[in-house]
Amino acid sequence: IPPEPEPEPTYEEKKRRFYWVFFLFDFDRDILNEEFYKDLHRLATEMRNFPDCRFEISGYTDARGSHEYNDKLSKRRAEAVKKALIEKGISADKLKIVAKGKRELQIKEAQDENQHAQNRRVEVRIINPENK
């Protein structure tokens, strides 16, 4: 007897699971790499499935540079993604920017450029009270 198929997640489960990590940036840059525009389109399409939700766009940097500089750079990165999402038809009032700088590194002891690149990212997640 084949196993029972997994039930389709509920809307609330999908909201809790909504989490995107991508948009890696070049060192010291806040311009989206073209390779991520397809992902951006998919993200905007997925966001439309949650019309009652707000989204947090968090920008990050690698560990190099001062906190002050990296906070500003991470904010510009998050703003670049926000601007691109607005251009894709997502309402600005649904989008909140957070600048995390180098506070939450994916790879804490990055040794090479590829590892540093993983820290230069933007994350997008739903921020409704039940998801915090």
Image (cartoon, rainbow, N blue to C red):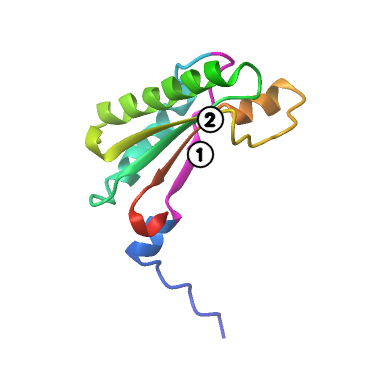
Q: Secondary structure at mark 2?
A: loop
Q: Provide the residue span drawn in magenta.
A: 17-28
For the C terminus, the quadrant is bottom left
Question: Does residue 60 lie above or below 3 as drawn?
Answer: above
Q: Residues within 10 Å of mark 1 (few under 14, many from 20)?
A: few
Front residue of this view, candidates 66 and 28: 66
Front residue of this view, candidates 129 and 112: 129
Residue at the spot of label 2: 121
Q: Position of residue 27 (x, y in %)?
A: 59, 15
Q: Is residue 85 left or right of residue 39?
A: left
Residue at position x 23%, y 52% in the image: 52
Q: Residue furthest front?
A: 68
The label on residue 123 is none
Q: Position of residue 64 (x, y in %)?
A: 66, 19
Occupied quadrant, residue 1: bottom right
Task: Indicate yes or no whether the magenta region holds residue 38.
Answer: no
Task: Indicate yes or no whether the magenta region holds residue 23.
Answer: yes
Q: Position of residue 116 (x, y in %)?
A: 67, 25
Sequence-wise, which precedes: disc 2 or disc 1? Answer: 1
Pointers 2 and 1 in contact (CB under 8 A)?
yes
Residue at position x 23%, y 36% in the image: 93
Residue at the spot of label 1: 21
Asked if residue 33 shows in the view, the reply is no
Amino acid, disc 1: Val
Amino acid, disc 2: Arg
Residue at position x 34%, y 42% in the image: 55
Q: Secondary structure at mark 1?
A: strand
Q: Residues within 10 Å of mark 2 (few under 14, many from 20)?
A: many
